[in-house]
Image (cartoon, grey):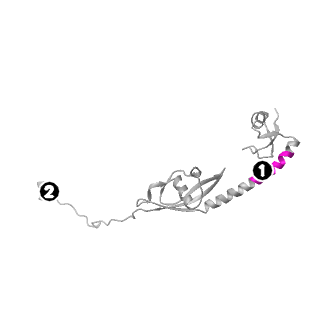
Amino acid sequence: MADVEVLLQRSVKNLGLVGDVVKVRPGYARNFLFPKRLAVPATSDAKRQIARRAARVREEEKQRLQEIAALIKRVQSLALKTKMKSDANGNLYGSVNAAKIVALAGAAGATIVEKDVRLEAPIKSVGTHRVRIHVRDDEFAELVIEVEGEGRPIVETPDLEPEGERRMHVPSEADNMA
């Protein structure tokens, strides 16, 4: 059976944008696109009507992309710092998780939702870490978080005996009596 041409009234993922004329299988058009009002048969009247609407939708899409770019720039300009208790090796006693990142961003004046923070695992070490923030669709921003430790510094204990002079234990009579 031959493909049919349809005019998209709304953008359909993996198919096209508003106003596009695409060829699809008749069953897909009849059972999915037409009942959900995503497309109409491609006639000259429908093409004229959608052309006006498509221009408006494309302008809205352009404006939305500009807003996304501005949001990404604003999030990437943030440099968050936090202090947490850590041991001498730089391992945190707690961790920096998505909720902590949202709180730090809120204190810095940015609004981030916890579900948009993409962490493979909570941050458990001192240092500078990059965290991905989901902005919209397939757009992500990278946020830099510097974690400082409040641990005790490593204190080297001096050896009580110099390395060259090893003392040997010589058993005495007191050891034999016990």
Q: Which label sits on residue 117? A: none
Question: Along the horizontal axis of the image, is 13 left or right of 41?
Answer: left
Q: Quadrant of the C terminus?
A: bottom left
Q: Quadrant of residue 8?
A: top right
Q: Secondary structure at mark 1?
A: helix
Question: Along the horizontal axis of the image, is 64 left or right of 99?
Answer: right
Magenta segment main secondary structure = helix
Q: Residues within 10 Å of mark 2 (few under 14, many from 20)?
A: few
Question: Along the horizontal axis of the image, is 25 left or right of 44?
Answer: left
Q: How many marks?
A: 2
- Which residue is painted at 71% across and 54% down in the image? 64
Q: Amino acid at mark 1?
A: Val
Q: Secondary structure at mark 2?
A: helix
Q: Residues within 10 Å of mark 1 (few under 14, many from 20)?
A: some
Answer above or below: position of 124 versus 30. Answer: below
Q: Amino acid at mark 2?
A: Asp
Towards the viewer: 112 or 133 = 112
Q: Which residues are magenta?
A: 48-60
Q: Which residue is mark 1?
A: 57
In the rendered image, residue 61 lying in the magenta stretch gets the answer: no
Q: Quadrant of the N terminus?
A: top right
Q: Which label sits on residue 175? A: 2
